[in-house]
Image: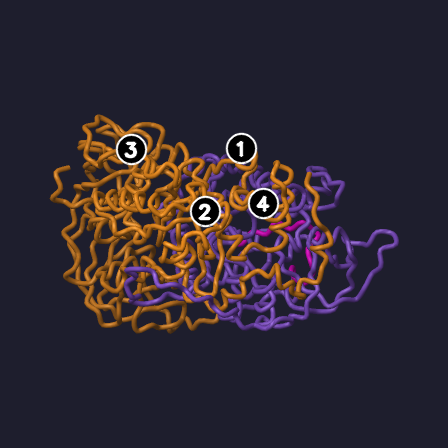
Amino acid sequence: MSTTNLDTAAADTTVLDGAALGHAARALGTRGLFRFATAGSVDDGKSTLVGRLLHDAKVVLADTLESLARTSAATGFGGGDGTLDLALLTDGLRAEREQGITIDVAYRYFSTGERSFVLADCPGHVQYTRNTVTGASTADAAIVLIDARKGVLEQTRRHLGVIGLLRVPNVIVAVNKIDLVDYDEARFADIAADVARVAAGLGLPAPHVLPVSALVGDNVVERSAHTGWYTGATLLGLLESLPTRDEADTAAEDFRFPVQLVLRPQGALAPCLDPEAFRDYRAYAGSIAAGSVSVGDPVTVASPGAPRRETTVIGIDAAGVSLDTATAPASVALRLAAELDIARGDTIAATGTLPESSADLHAQLCWLSPAPLLPGATVLVKHGTATLRAKVGSIAGVLDLEDFGLLPAASLELNDIGTVVLRLAGELPTEPYARHHRTGAFLVIDPQSGNTLAAGLVGERTSAA
Amino acid sequence: MSTTAPAPARPVPAAPGTPGSAHQIDVLDALEAESIHILREVVAEFERPAMLFSGGKDSVVMLHLATKAFWPGTVPFPLLHVDTGHNFEEVIAFRDETVEKLGLRLVVAGVQDYIDDGRLTERADGTRNPLQTTPLLDAIGENRFDVLFGGGRRDEDKARAKERILSLRDEFGQWDPRNQRPELWNLYNGRHTQGQHVRAFPISNWTELDIWRYIERENIALPPLYYAHQREVFEHSGMWRAVGEFSQPGPGVPVQARTVRYRTVGDMSCTGAVLSEADTTAKVIAEVATTTITERGATRADDRISEAAMEDRKKDGYF
């Protein structure tokens, strides 16, 4: 049992201690939510980097810092200033703290004057693909750590490969432990050149590469006096200024709206609403997966196994407020001109933009289950709001994370990224993940246990799968 | 009290190659859209949902989001309150008014009933929070709920930071943090087998400050405890505790009238007040934005039992 500093808790919390002031105050002026994920090999110092970021950005509150100092001292660190085990800020589970490792993705929240952040802190060991995919699937940016002494490793290539596959819009490579190579500019330049080569080979957008020391704090929040040769942004500076996925994507994308459920209240109307006014109310609830919609827009409805139908949007409702226009990722309800039979699993899209529906799904799967995938298996595919049975056809091969070629394979094993063809029980208007990250993603689910087996990324239909 | 003005932003070096932003999405709009998406997914895919509702600010915000998600329909599930028997009167009154106003069904699982008939034993330290697990799991079984919405936020506790938005529980209600399903994109997998159930946390990604800013934006009513008021309190274990039937000062501990408010409103036996003059939502936001103490650290004795108190309770089936 740990002790608690009782004096602190009883203190008048409205009296501010300037030195320990949590900078949540800045959140009042932030301009948006930015989600980022970390990826790094064991012992690259990833948890320490995250801890350093939180600590130096002064977003760790006083009681958490005290608890950190106590636990640091108890586990062999001094516990005083400068000798805190910053990794303890994120390793929250009993087993993680005991073993000094990160077992599962943890989500952390903090704000600066610029932005509010959601950090998915992903473990780097054993099940790296599973965890990196989980953390990076929603990320606006991913941070890959490299140990400055070791340079680009196989693990770095894997992380960059997965991040590239998931089309994370911003890639940050933190060359950590730069203090241990005496802040050597040439060493950093060599690693940055290696990273650029790997990224180019993977077709990634140019990564932001920066020299950091998580332990000492160089270029994490404060610019380092030891790296005068580095003129780019600090890690926090980058996180505060890079565009989010939605900011980058949405304006250019065509409108896509998977129908979650039909709102038809009839007898079960919310209190205080006029039953007459809502007698014939019918709207389709969902969140906008891509693009924007405005009242008056022509739309096409695609249902698995039914011909397409066209109509017009006559209303966009958000809990009693009528909108003229709405943009991803808003959750709204659409009213349509024609009385159509529309159900969960159908897609409403801007007319003339939706590809032909197909029962053949050419895709890449990140296999996340310990039991291998074999051709002929029956699985469930959850795409948008539609869940369909599917049969696994051929396995075209497994991605070689060394050189990103395709190796022949008879099955997919845990952490494999394989190219497969799935035969769906109905037709879906799927689109390549590379072009539409929200409508090109799907889950593969075990129909018996219900477990999630794979992350699916729709490929180009013309690809030789 | 400090000023409400945000600290001046530090100069941000321009990132090389940053494209101009097409549009910016407000934090509260993004969080609200995500929560409504989760509420609708769960209602569409489960047979018998229910929502944990205590009258506390997080469950009040979650219920408000549900009224939006299903508007103009009514909220399509009952509420479940696990009542420790040591709740603040104001909160119970608020709970009942809310249920009445929205025309919902409320299921109450009472810890007191379990103590009265011997199924549970009062703990030596008097705190009843850990005792909630048994009535909760029994209520889930008796009502055959297959999913329970909870107002847990990942910023509350390091164990909650690890939990998925849809979290599978086994037939004993247990959470296995080492064997969670991957949760990818906004595609939530709620499949479960007979006997298992799911806990769904639609406000996982909100912080205490987001909750308060949303309460102000949406003009959401809360129990009066959340705002500064005069109350008879005494100091206990470093917290200000209200004098009440279940919360009495020890010998020699003076009772004082102080101006306080609550950051959380759980069981009276383990929830402390903070000294505060914040009697409006705007003042509370300013206070929360500049506090140096975490929400649970300031006011919840049950989370101080050990470093992993929340994790241990959650493994047993707690929310």
Q: Chain of mark 4?
A: A
Are the residues under badges 2 and 1 in a single subunit? yes
Contact (Cβ within 8 Å) of mark 3 with mark 1:
no
Identify the colour scheme used.
by chain
Q: Which circle's residue, 3 or 4, is located before the other in the chain?
A: 4
Q: Are marks 2 and 3 in contact (CB under 8 Å)?
A: no
The chain whose colour is orange is: A
Q: Would you identify the image quadrant in which residue B309 lies? A: top right
Q: Residue at x 66, y 55 (%)?
A: B298
Q: Which mark is residue A84?
A: 4
Of labels 2 and 1, earlier in sequence is 1
Check residue A213 in the rendering and tell me which mark sits there, or answer none: 2
Are discs 1 and 4 both within one chain?
A: yes
Whether discs 3 and 4 lie on one chain: the answer is yes
Q: Position of residue B218 (x, y in %)?
A: 49, 70
Tell me which chain appears purple: B
The numbered mark 2 sits on a residue in which chain? Answer: A
The residue furthest right is B252
Task: Give left or right: position of A238 versus A193.
Answer: right
Q: Nearer the viewer, residue A160 or B151?
A: A160
Is disc 1 in contact with disc 4, using a CB cutoff of under 8 Å?
no
Q: Residues within 10 Å of mark 1 (few under 14, many from 20)?
A: few
Instruction: Give left or right: position of A68 versus B217.
Output: right
Identify the residue position indicated by label 3 in the image.
Answer: A416
Q: Quadrant of the C terminus of chain A?
A: top left
